[in-house]
Image: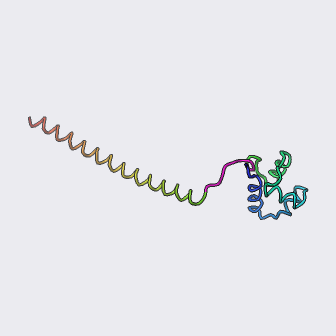
Amino acid sequence: MFEIGKRIKTLRQQKGWSQNDIAKLLNISVPAFSKIESDITDVNISRLNQIAETFGVPVIDLISTQVEPSQSLLDELKEAKDTIAVQSAKINQLQEYIITLYEQLHKKNAQDVINS
């Protein structure tokens, strides 16, 4: 289900508009608009275009199934990003250590060749 009504309600609330305000702009009754917001009434494409224009958004914003991430998901993503940064720093340190060991080994081998 697209839950278009929920998206419309969210947009209306973001604008600070009442159901009455939007109903007047759409030239429909408040109960009719309430049914749209409650996903009780299906919205035809003409009405969908009218609603999108009223809010100044593309129609795709009303019918998209994309969901805003929850705060807990955002927190998990931040934690994962921080963990990756820490692990990346450790990998860089390990690479530097390996390079240092390699250089020391190379110098020792070169010294062994000179001494033999």
Q: Nearer the viewer, residue 97 or 36?
A: 36
Q: Position of residue 1 (x, y in %)?
A: 73, 49
- Residue occupying the point 87% across, 61% down: 31
> Which scheme is used to colour this image of the protein?
rainbow
- Residue occupying the point 74% across, 52% down: 3
- Residue occupying the point 84% across, 59% down: 22
- Residue occupying the point 66% across, 52% down: 67
Q: Nearer the viewer, residue 70 or 84?
A: 70
Image quadrant occupied by the C terminus: top left
Q: Main secondary structure of the magenta part?
A: loop
Q: Position of residue 98 (x, y in %)?
A: 28, 45
Which residue is outermost to the left? 116
Residue 97 in the magenta stretch? The answer is no
In the image, the segment drawn in magenta is 61-69
> For residue 45, which quarter of the picture?
top right
Q: Position of residue 53 (x, y in %)?
A: 82, 51
